[in-house]
Amino acid sequence: MAKKNNQKVMKNLKKKLKKDIIDIVQPRENRIYMRVKPEKAPGIVEYLFSKYKCKLCTASGMDMREGIEIIYHLAKEDENMIINVKTLIPYSKLEIESIGKKIKAFRWIEREINEMLGVKFKGHPDMRRLLLADSFPKGKYPLRKNFKNSDVTDEDYDYERSGI
Amino acid sequence: MDILKKSFKKSIWVFHLSTAACNNCDIEVLELLTPKYDVERFGIKLVGSPRHADALLVCGSVNAHAKPRFLEVYRQTPKPCLVVAFGSCGCSSGIFRDSYSIVGPVDKVLKEEDPDAKIVYIPGCPPKPEAMIEGIVKGLEAV
């Protein structure tokens, strides 16, 4: 029963999003991975979230050396499935359209990816620091592969910004 | 030396401050107040404001966010005061030593503000209640 539904979801997605996605696979019956271009990703995630009634689990950012990969994890609860939308943003142009400007649920995770990996989210309404200290030097991104702990020394911190 | 002896002669009041601790030490501090160890019989008491305190109990490896706040609390504590670097993290930043947001253990941060600060180290993850009591006693003997 569940298996049949899951194939239906796959078929639906293929039909609706055919021209936008690079590839789509279903390694397990309750999991779908799709790889898309960074320009198309926000539109697809918005479609999945608003029209296709998926829920946002989280988004994750990862430094893949050739670029930064963002994976949006979306749960299709009534079909018991998880849909992952992967997009690789190249280092030469580290920016992507913000989903947070329309859907509030994405705002915090976009702020976190912005400060930890340095991806710029265009049109995000509130891009303050979320996890890092306010005094942490600007332009240093601690979760990138080429970040070394010695890149940030005591002199780099600007305690004026911490508001004490 | 006279003023030191005079100021630490009576009951020690302690202000408990957490500077990016993992909460384990904070929980163990409360154990000192339970009937088994009951430090209040020695007059050691947790107070709600650093302005009432004789000693600061600092848990946790100090990170960049906590550093200015910790130093502000230290400035508000009446001097002379005793600073207790509590737990492995307080003594040496512990396992968080090489993390990107850590600016150093308690003594390193404090020496920038006040080179003459009196610091007691109580290592352990978390320290045993007996060790905590002994640490405070040793600190008092030293001043």
Image: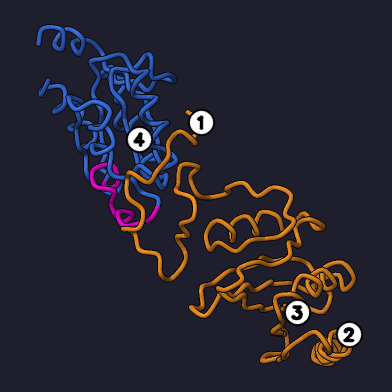
Chain colours: A orange, B blue
- Badge 3 marks a residue whose secondary structure is strand
Is residue A22 shown left or right of residue A17?
left
- Badge 4 marks a residue whose secondary structure is helix
**Pointers 4 and 2 within a single chain:** no
* Tag shown at residue B129: none
Q: Residues within 10 Å of mark 3 (few under 14, many from 20)?
A: many
* Tag shown at residue A163: 1
- Find residue B117 and report its horizontal and vertical position in percent: 20, 25
- CA–CA distance between discs 4 and 3? 45 Å
- Mark nearer the viewer, 4 or 1: 1
Q: Nearer the viewer, residue A111 or A118?
A: A118
Q: Residue at x 24, y 39 (%)?
A: B108
Q: Is residue B73 above or below residue A6?
A: above
Q: Chain of mark 3?
A: A
- Mark nearer the viewer, 2 or 1: 1
- Mark nearer the viewer, 3 or 1: 1
Q: Which residue is mark 4?
A: B29
Q: Which residue is mark 2?
A: A16
Which residues make up the magenta segment? B88-100
Q: Tell me if label 2 and label 1 are in contact, CB under 8 Å.
A: no
Earlier along the polypeptide chain: callout 3 or callout 1?
3
Amino acid bearing label 2: Lys
Amino acid bearing label 4: Val
Q: Chain of mark 4?
A: B
Q: Residue at x 72, y 89 (%)?
A: A22
Amino acid bearing label 3: Met
